Amino acid sequence: MDNTKNPQMNKMAAAPVNRLMLSMGIPMIISMMLQAVYNIVDSAFVSNMADGGEQALNALTLAFPVQMLMVAIAIGTGVGMNALMSRSLGQGDRELAGKAAGNAIFLAAVIYVVFLLFGIFGTGAYVGSQTKNAEIAEMAEEYIRICCTLSFGIIFFSVFEKTLQASGRSLFSTIAQVAGAVTNIALDPIMIYGLLGVPEMGIVGAALATVIGQVVSCVLALIFHFRLIKEIDSGWRYIRPSGSVIGKIYSIGLPAIIAQALMSVMTYGLNLILVQISENAVTAYGLYYKIQQFILFAAFGLRDAITPIVSFGYGMGSRERVKQGIKYGMLYTLIIMAAGLVLLEIFAQPFAALFGLSGETERLCVSAMRVISLSFIFAGANVAFQGIFQALESGVQSLVISVCRQILFVLPVAWGFSLVVRNSGSTDMMWLVWLTFLIAEGLSAVIAVILMTGISRRRISTLGN
């Protein structure tokens, strides 16, 4: 098959990389930022509940690692499929591209069954490991149970979103994401506060609004997938599991899954560390993390454009397009993170006020925003490097950066600084704990540059022009 006769594939093969990066990246950035909207919107509405708003916000913080883990596994599977499908299309292998997409659908069904079982049987033990407050525990269990048992929307959407992105149709994945986010935003006040004749459901309403929005996104993405993507074939024989195809998906996707799952592990670990200081610290960090996600997910969106562009160029054997993909991907990512740094430094106080925080919780949240945001430039570089590594079949190196920036240089350092704060007898020195992220991202960026040098020598310099 000559892909250059296909207009969509011709764009991937010949369009100027800087414009291609923007045309693909902007919809993906919007899409990823809208994923962050789900958690931010829920938090904004439940924190302003007339009764138990701050406890509900704490419950969402405890539930957040499970949501992140679910998304990590689904998106990581999609990332592996995305890179394999993009490279196969770049090589003109329609059959393998179709099997990559079909097997990803099978894997999404398996992932849903796992989280369905966790939602039924595992929520109590998980929540009990983080809090002894009965009111907070009950809210967290209700929220997690609904989000897990009805998680098919977000899981299958994550796969169809990546097939649309891999074929250069990221605009349609964004349309699906926007529709789901708007649905969630519209339903949240109705179902949480009990408007328009709907009974007041509190945090249960927040969970239901979230999963309904996810289902809307999934249905639209499914329709776009089957109606618009003509570069690959579909059918049951492509969905039938193939060990070799699944192996190829996870040779790229497993490091991506672990990388994103480490966000969940990091948040869970920090919850355990911060609760030893105060519950207000847990609530403040949880809210900061959701606000930060709005910016960090923008970098993730651009990373999801970097991966198929660099992967397609690598499949073509074009050194120039690979180098251009790396150059513009890194540049645009750093611009995004610099803008995010300025935004949080200027508007930290209004953001905290938006969620109805007061007293110590508000002070800690503002402090977190102003200190942790200093790490954004390094964080952006690390995110871009991870997308580049995945595209160049260097998933292990991507995983190394994830372990460094989210576990190795975070939890031990944060725990040590937390001892200083606890021994001081007040939370005035919490800035030390927040400083952990600047240290972790900076050291990880140095390691990423060293790894990139080796990958460039082995993978890029051997390509033709």
Image: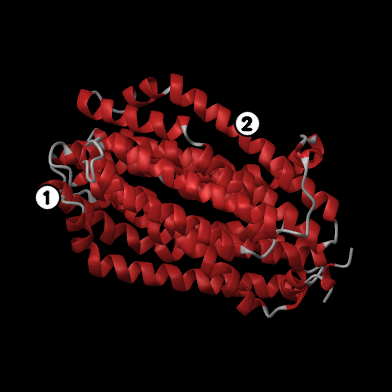
- Disc number placed over residue 123 in the picture, else none: none
User: Which image quarter is the C terminus in?
Assistant: bottom right
| Residue 204 in the figure: left or right of residue 262 | left
| Residue 102 in the figure: left or right of residue 259 | right
- The answer to whether mark 2 and mark 1 are in CB contact below 8 A is no
Q: How far across and down, in percent of the image, does residue 80 sit? A: 67, 48
Q: Place residue 47 in its image quadrant.
A: top left
Position above or below: 454 against 416:
below
**Tag 2: amino acid:** Val
Residue 282 appears anywhere in the view: no
Q: Secondary structure at mark 1?
A: loop
- Mark 2 or 1, nearer chain start: 2
| Residue 322 in the figure: left or right of residue 123 | right
Residue drawn at x 66%, y 76% is: 17
User: Which image quarter is the N terminus in?
Assistant: bottom right
Residue behind mark 2: 110
Q: How far across and down, in percent of the image, does residue 250 sit? A: 69, 42
Q: As rendered, which of 50 and 194 lies closer to the eye?
A: 194
Q: How far across and down, in percent of the image, does residue 86 sit? A: 73, 59
* Residues packed near mark 2 inside 10 Å, few (<14), some (14 to 19) or many (20 plus): few
**Tag 1: amino acid:** Ser
* Residues packed near mark 1 inside 10 Å, few (<14), some (14 to 19) or many (20 plus): few
For the view shown, which residue lies furthest in the front direction? 197
Q: Secondary structure at mark 2?
A: helix
Q: Place residue 199 in its image quadrant.
A: top left
Residue behind mark 1: 358
User: How many marks can you see?
Assistant: 2
Disc 2/disc 1 C-alpha distance (Å)? 43 Å
For the view shown, which residue lies furthest in the left direction? 359
- In this picture the colour scheme is secondary structure
